[in-house]
Image: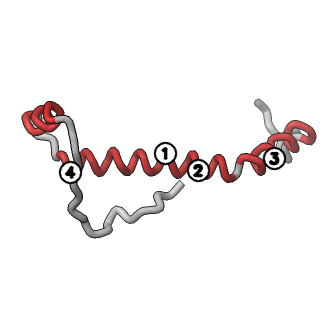
Amino acid sequence: MQPRFSQDAPKRAVNLTLSSDLVRLGKELGLNLSGVAEQALAYAVSARLAERWAEENRSAIGAYNRRVEAEGVFSDGLRSF
């Protein structure tokens, strides 16, 4: 699934509240805190969008699975596995 957000969108300053120990350790380890936060947010957004898609399409997926269970798929006679 393609992300619904642009990786090239302009950056926007935001305020975050983070554990002071994590910030200190992240800086000591040379991590780009903004980059790490952006990657984590992108992952969380993608996961939530996938959950939303699955929920919105749950009935259609169920109907398809029931049909395949009852009728099989077109390639049933062609597969060798």
- Residue at (40%, 46%) from the top-left corner? 43
| Label 4 SS | helix
The label number, if any, that marks residue 52 in the structure image: 2
The numbered dot on residue 34 is 4
Amino acid type, mark 4: Ser
Report the front residue among 74 and 38. 38
- The residue pinned by badge 3 equals 64
Residue 31 percent location from the top left of the image = 15, 41
The kind of residue tagged 3 is Tyr
Question: In the rendered structure, which disc, 2 or 4, sits on the residue that comes first in sequence?
Answer: 4
Instruction: Find numbered disc 2 in the image and state the secondary structure of the residue it sits on.
Output: helix
Secondary structure, mark 3, is: helix
Q: Earlier in the sequence, mark 4 or mark 3?
A: 4
Distance from Cα at disc 4 to Cα at disc 1: 20 Å
Q: Amino acid at mark 1?
A: Ala
Read off the residue under disc 1. Answer: 47
How far apart in space, not on screen, are marks 4 and 3 (Cα)?
42 Å
Q: Secondary structure at mark 1?
A: helix
- CA distance separating discs 2 and 1: 9 Å
Q: Residue at x 25, y 45 (%)?
A: 36
Specify the quadrant that holds the N terminus.
Answer: bottom right
- Left or right? Give the position of 2 relative to 30: right
The answer to which quarter of the image holds residue 23 is top left
Distance Cα–Cα, label 3 vs label 2: 18 Å
Pointers 3 and 2 in contact (C-beta within 8 Å)? no
